[in-house]
């Protein structure tokens, strides 16, 4: 009785690991839920909005004040001139933003270029929308300083494009690697989008979490990409409000109209009082973002140190709040077996690397941890991980 589509993907591995951690009382460094409280003024604005009557549907594509605040942020932070009435669609998280976008642009036979490893939702997104994914690997390379990083091969990227390509899906900063795409890389990708007359769909949910003074470059800000970029972001991570489900899609008007239709019939709209409070979030002053980066950078360095001491080989993330590790040194037959053993025997949860690849074997020697936790929890996780060597 069930659809063929629903049999083509499994339940989320990440959310499954969270349940497994709860069952075994382990420290959960798997799911990317921020371990911090939202800013007080943002919480207060939500309570005020409920008290002040914002309790019915908003305009389906977003409350006017919230769209105005988003348009202002897009112009000033991302460098993308944005009109609230023409370009912005507020969605139930960037998750819904990506799904509505795919449904709005995909026709049978359309191909989507995706870098792998990728955020796990993109797999089901392509299946539900009927797109054919074409994967381009981000391969491990060494920087001149000797750090391990990930980069694509230009020939492999070019070969992935064809007359059937509808779009490339980007994620910068990237989950799970923490890779931040450089301006040069984005320019190369933009040139291919122009040559093959296709779109860029870019998920920039971690845009405010970038380390070592690297800039965040939005491909939609490149002049040649203005009419062919759909930028997706949201408030979940930057303001620690993943449960509020506030995301948005910024697109040229001809695309925004199609996205708004999909959004309307999928969800009607995002929670109205929380959109009103979202205005307060987007109006926080620049110090908030500086402190956010400092707070996360401190945890990034701490977890890198703890994981390295415990025997993991770490890929240093340039952005977001995840650390991908190589677990070959522990000698387990697979990432999934190691991840389960780690929860049960050591009391720490991570995400098996295979869940981020279309070819699971590419992730068999990898495990991803997140560092959006308080320092004490990270230190306790580190102390537990030090016991791995005794137990194997
Ligand atoms: N995109 C990426 C790359 C993510 O890592 C996540 C959450 O982990 C999301 C989107 C989901 O964001 P939202 O809460 O806005 O749906």
Image: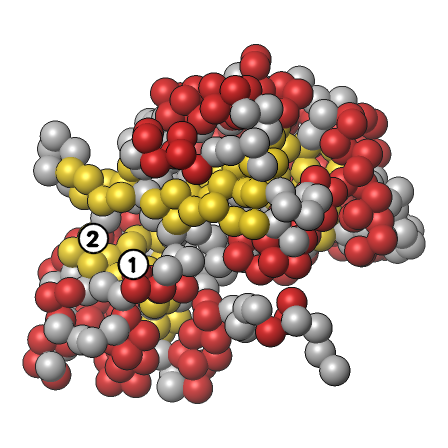
In the displayed structure image, the side of residue 318 where residue 284 appears, left or right: right
Query: The N terminus lies in which quarter of the figure?
Result: bottom right
In the image, 367 versus 245, the foreground residue is 367
- Quadrant position of residue 203: top right
In the displayed structure image, the side of residue 320 where residue 202 appears, left or right: right
Secondary structure under tag 1 reads helix
In the displayed structure image, the side of residue 185 where residue 230 appears, left or right: right
Residue 103: x and y in percent read 72, 48
The relative height of residue 183 versus residue 103 in the rendered view (above or below) is above
Q: Earlier in the sequence, mark 1 or mark 2?
A: 2
Query: What residue is rendered at 56% in x and 36% in y?
Result: 165
Secondary structure under tag 2 reads strand
The residue labelled by disc 1 is 362
The relative height of residue 202 versus residue 78 in the rendered view (above or below) is below
CB under 8 Å between discs 1 and 2: no
Query: The C terminus lies in which quarter of the figure?
Result: bottom left
Q: Nearer the viewer, mark 1 or mark 2?
A: 1
Q: CA distance from mark 1 to mark 2?
A: 16 Å
In the image, 341 versus 208, the foreground residue is 341
Return the mark for residue 371: none
Query: What residue is rendered at 55% in x and 68% in y?
Result: 9
Tell me if residue 374 can be seen.
Answer: no
Residue 150: x and y in percent read 27, 41
Tell me if residue 350 can be seen.
Answer: yes
Query: What residue is rendered at 43% in x and 81% in y?
Result: 20
Query: What residue is rendered at 39% in x and 49% in y?
Result: 116
The residue labelled by disc 2 is 314
Q: Is mark 2 within 8 Å of ligand 1?
A: no
């Amino acid at each position: 009785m069930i659809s063929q589509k629903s049999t083509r993907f499994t339940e989320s591995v990440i959310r499954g690991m969270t349940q497994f951690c709860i069952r075994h009382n382990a420290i959960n460094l798997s799911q990317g839920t921020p371990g911090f409280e939202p800013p007080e003024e943002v919480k207060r604005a939500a309570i005020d909005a409920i008290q002040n009557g914002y309790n019915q549907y908003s305009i389906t594509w977003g409350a006017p004040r919230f769209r105005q605040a988003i348009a202002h942020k897009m112009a000033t932070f991302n460098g993308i001139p944005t009109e609230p009435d023409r370009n912005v669609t507020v969605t139930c998280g960037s998750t819904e933003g990506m799904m509505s976008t795919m449904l709005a642009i995909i026709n049978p036979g359309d191909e989507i270029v995706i870098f792998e490893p990728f955020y796990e939702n993109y797999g089901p997104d392509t299946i539900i929308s009927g797109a054919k994914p074409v994967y381009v690997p981000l391969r491990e390379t060494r920087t001149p300083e000797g750090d391990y990083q990930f980069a694509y091969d230009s020939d492999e990227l070019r070969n992935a494009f064809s007359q059937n390509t509808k779009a490339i899906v980007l994620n910068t900063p990237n989950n799970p690697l923490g890779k931040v795409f450089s301006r040069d890389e984005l320019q190369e990708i933009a040139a291919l989008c122009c040559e093959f007359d296709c779109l860029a769909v870019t998920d920039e949910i971690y845009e405010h979490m970038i380390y070592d003074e690297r800039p965040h470059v939005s491909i939609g800000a490149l002049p040649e990409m203005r009419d062919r970029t759909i930028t997706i972001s949201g408030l979940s991570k930057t303001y620690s409000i993943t449960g509020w489900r506030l995301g948005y899609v910024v697109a040229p008007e001809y695309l925004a109209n199609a996205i708004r239709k999909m959004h309307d019939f999928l969800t009607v709209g995002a929670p109205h009082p929380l959109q009103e409070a979202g205005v307060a979030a987007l109006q926080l002053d620049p110090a908030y973002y500086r402190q956010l980066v400092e707070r996360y950078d401190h945890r990034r360095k701490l977890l890198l140190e703890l994981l390295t001491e415990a025997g993991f080989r770490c890929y240093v993330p340039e952005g977001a709040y995840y650390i991908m590790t190589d677990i070959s040194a522990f000698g387990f037959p697979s990432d999934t077996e190691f991840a389960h053993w780690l929860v049960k025997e050591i009391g720490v949860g991570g995400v098996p690397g295979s869940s981020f690849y279309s070819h699971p074997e590419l992730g068999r020697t990898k495990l991803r941890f997140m560092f959006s936790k308080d320092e004490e929890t990270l230190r306790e996780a580190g102390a537990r991980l030090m016991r791995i060597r005794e137990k194997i």
